[in-house]
């Protein structure tokens, strides 16, 4: 079976769009966010993602419903939840093995933001998949933070992934960006040559055909025009839409509501100067560590 591909990045780094694009390659199967990196058993997963955090199960439930029954109806999702509950004793490795068996000979692609929350999560993935590929997607800390604040406001107003009353984290988005990037850069040293590739999301989205081709070359998969064209249509994924009532999400809600690429908008993506600081803090300067990493990633 092929080794999987993980997109690793802080939240609000265009991972939903880029993951949706790459996931449409004929040799790849794009998964919704399954959140398996933080736990060792399915029982732990069900215990962790309950109550106000139950929405974190949506991606895995939709995936199981689609793989088992070829649909994501409310009834299929209910059966997927029951199936998962009956396998509380399964290890994370057993679940990954099952998913790969269902997917077949395609490369699984996964991009849960939870993967980057702790370096232990990344190392758990590497322990299960020692030959996996890791695509590090970067985004300017200023625009990523602004996007995070906008989503946070959606959640407060009950329009986002958590629905009415969903609690949101109070962490400053720069802190989240910095913590994830530090985890990724430390994890990078655990990898062998060829397992890691870093790409600026802004550049990829401005010139998708070129950078998608480079990613395909790195992975050793098809780079022909038909394969590249398929990746320009993330809306073709069965997961690129809202799910049934009990499993609505499994990805960025804004992407799920409108997964079709707006090429004109993407060409206008800009990278503000780092000296502009954090807009959500009135232009206050970024932390020194943030500036150091951002410059290392090619931002100025």
Image (cartoon, rainbow, N blue to C red):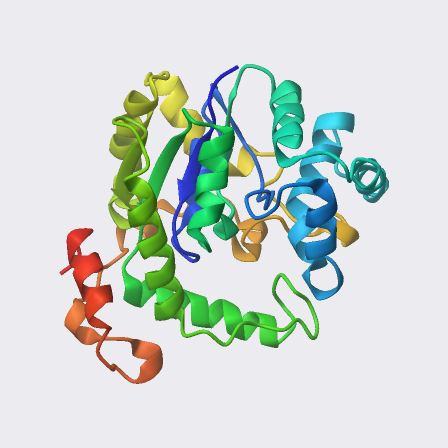
Location of the C terminus (image quadrant): bottom left
Residue 172: image location, x then y, percent: 41, 74
Position of residue 201 in the picture relative to residue 258 (left or right)? left
- 98 is higher (above) or lower (below) than 80: above
- Tell which of 261 and 98 is nearer to you: 98
Position of residue 281 in the picture relative to residue 251 (left or right)? left
The residue under the point 75% across, 63% down is: 51
- 11 is higher (above) or lower (below) than 208: below
Question: Which corner quadrant of the image does residue 155 belong to?
Answer: bottom right
How many badges with numbers are in the image? Answer: 0
Question: Which corner quadrant of the image does residue 269 belong to?
Answer: bottom left
- Tell which of 269 and 39 is nearer to you: 39
Residue 295: image location, x then y, percent: 15, 57
Q: Is residue 233 visible?
A: no
- Tell which of 47 and 266 is nearer to you: 47
The residue under the point 76% across, 48% down is: 244
Question: Which corner quadrant of the image does residue 76 belong to?
Answer: top right
Q: Is residue 256 visible?
A: yes
Position of residue 195 in the picture relative to residue 50 (left or right)? left
Residue 86: image location, x then y, percent: 84, 37
The residue under the point 54% across, 53% down is: 252
The residue under the point 71% across, 41% down is: 42
Residue 169: image location, x then y, percent: 53, 72
Position of residue 204 in the picture relative to residue 96 (left or right)? left
């Amino acid at each position: 079976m092929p080794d999987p591909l993980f997109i690793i990045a802080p939240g609000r780094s265009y991972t939903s769009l880029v993951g949706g694009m790459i996931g449409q390659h004929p040799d790849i199967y794009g998964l919704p966010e399954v959140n398996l990196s933080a736990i060792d058993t399915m029982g732990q997963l069900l215990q962790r993602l309950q109550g106000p955090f139950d929405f974190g199960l949506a991606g895995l439930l939709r995936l199981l419903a689609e793989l088992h029954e070829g649909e994501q109806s409310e009834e299929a999702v209910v059966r997927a939840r029951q199936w998962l509950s009956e396998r509380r004793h399964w290890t994370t490795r057993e679940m990954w093995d099952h998913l790969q068996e269902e997917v077949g000979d395609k490369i699984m692609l996964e991009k849960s933001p939870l993967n980057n929350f702790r370096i232990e999560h990344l190392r758990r993935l590497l322990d299960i998949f020692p030959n996996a590929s890791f695509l590090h997607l970067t985004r300017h800390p200023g625009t990523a933070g602004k996007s995070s604040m906008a989503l946070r406001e959606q959640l407060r107003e009950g329009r986002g992934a958590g629905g009415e009353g969903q609690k949101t984290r109070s962490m400053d988005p720069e802190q989240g960006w910095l913590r994830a990037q530090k985890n990724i850069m430390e994890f990078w040293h655990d990898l062998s040559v060829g397992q890691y590739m870093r790409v600026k999301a802004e550049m990829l989205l401005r010139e998708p055909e070129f950078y998608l081709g480079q990613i395909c070359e790195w992975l050793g998969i098809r780079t022909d025009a038909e394969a590249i064209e398929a990746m320009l249509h993330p809306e073709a994924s069965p997961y690129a839409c809202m799910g049934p009532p009990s499993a609505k999400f499994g990805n960025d809600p804004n992407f799920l509501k409108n997964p079709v690429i707006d090429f004109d908008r993407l060409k206008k993506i800009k990278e503000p100067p780092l000296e502009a600081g954090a807009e959500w803090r009135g232009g206050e300067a970024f932390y020194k560590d943030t500036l150091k990493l951002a410059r290392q990633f090619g931002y100025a």
